[in-house]
Amino acid sequence: MTPLPPGAMLGILGGGQLGRMSAMAAARLGYRCHSYAPGADEPGMQVAAARTVAAYEDHDALARFAAQVDVVTFEFENVPAETVEILARRVPCRPGEKALSICQDRLQEKAFLEGIGVPVAPWRAVRTEAELQAAVAELGLPSVLKTTRLGYDGRGQAVLRHPDDLAAAWSRLAPRPLILEGFVPFTLEVSAIAARGADGALAVFDATENAHRHHILDISYAPARVAPEVAAAARDHVAAVARGLDLVGLVALEMFLLPDGRLIGNEIAPRPHNSGHWTMDACTASQFEQHIRAVVGLPLGAPDRHHDAVMRNLIGPEGMAAWPGLQGQKGIAPHLYGKAEARPGRKMGHANRLLPLGALAGLDDAAALGPLAAIAVQKT
Ligand code: AMP
């Protein structure tokens, strides 16, 4: 495909921080962005050359938007399928509908991962309370009950530890379609991110090790402090995902690491991912730049790391309290998303700490964090 020329207009659906950082990467490559989102003054809107504030179901607004952009991409995967269909009739949409529909539904996602040979937790579809009983009888306890759609950051799920937990979990999550997953006794959470161009070229970043607090990503360490064969398997898995989805764009795969070194695929996000924010400062081409490069048809950048990195999110008022202290420090790159109100649990920004190549492997968490240890996290 011929790359879009400098000055071309990219449409970005979704106005959050991922759209903001994508638009900033696009601007660096000489492109303009049109941000489409239901709310005004969202982080992505603030840095866009053009804006549409409208619902995803507003057909007229979608038609006007499509007429004004050369290509459309997404900063989140839960865009209604009909929105994508309307846009795709008028303008190229990347990643394609296949990537979006598979990643919107945990059942499709699990079946897809199994199909391409990425191991997953044992799972059962659950539509009725009787099916829940039967699934628990088969998979045992503990297990995890999740909504198949629109779950993120631990929302829409319940860990079942005792037979008494079933009724409460069912009444909280039903009548939405659900999935029961066997509980994975993981030692570490790992993710990997791949970009895939329209010509099928792949660029895969180093695997990342992730620590969550209250179901929200707190810290990413890159590269993951795992055995080389585990890191290689993580990268192979995400490359298989990118190929299998026929993706043009960027995809992140979240995985669990078992004590025996096996990786279990958990969730796919066909877009830039929080666990890839370290690439903004530790790679020549960040995940956002790779996303834009793929979408406009430019060759991908090399995914090499020039530093080791630790990323910590600034979440809610506690995270924002650390902001002044992060300024002007050697090796610390702070980022803010332009959100007016620091509500509890809200991702306000992040900070990357750069370390010399190879340094991270020998450090414990406290030494790896350094000044990032001063970032407080929400207590409950
Ligand atoms: P998810 O929404 O699927 O990303 O899950 C959110 C978090 O819940 C994960 O980061 C894990 O910490 C935990 N979790 C999800 N699924 C499982 C599972 N099958 N076994 C154990 N922990 C899980």
Image (cartoon, rainbow, N blue to C red):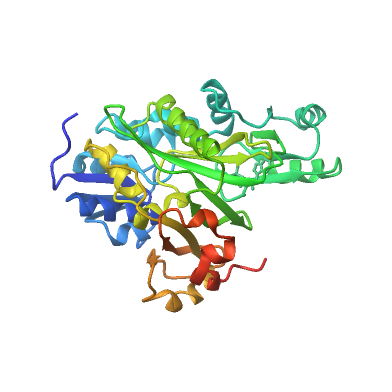
Quarter of the image for the N terminus: give it: top left
Find residue 214 and report its horizontal and vertical position in percent: 64, 58
State whether residue 324 is above or below residue 283.
below
- Considering every residue shown, the one lying at the far bottom of the view is 324
Res. 158 image quadrant: top right
Quarter of the image for the C terminus: give it: bottom right
Point 66% across, 32% down: residue: 121
Where does ligand 1 appear, by image quarter? top right
- Considering every residue shown, the one lying at the far top of the view is 115
State whether residue 90 is above or below residue 327.
above
Find residue 246 and report its horizontal and vertical position in percent: 38, 26
Find residue 289 and report its horizontal and vertical position in percent: 29, 47
Point 22% across, 54% down: residue: 27
Find residue 31 and report its horizontal and vertical position in percent: 19, 49
Point 52% across, 33% down: residue: 233
Number of marks drawn: 0
Closer-to-camera residue (339/241): 241
Res. 340 image quadrant: bottom left
Closer-to-camera residue (147/138): 138
Does residue 78 appear anywhere in the picture?
Answer: no
Does residue 196 appear anywhere in the picture?
Answer: yes
Closer-to-camera residue (108/286): 286
Point 13% across, 46% down: residue: 6
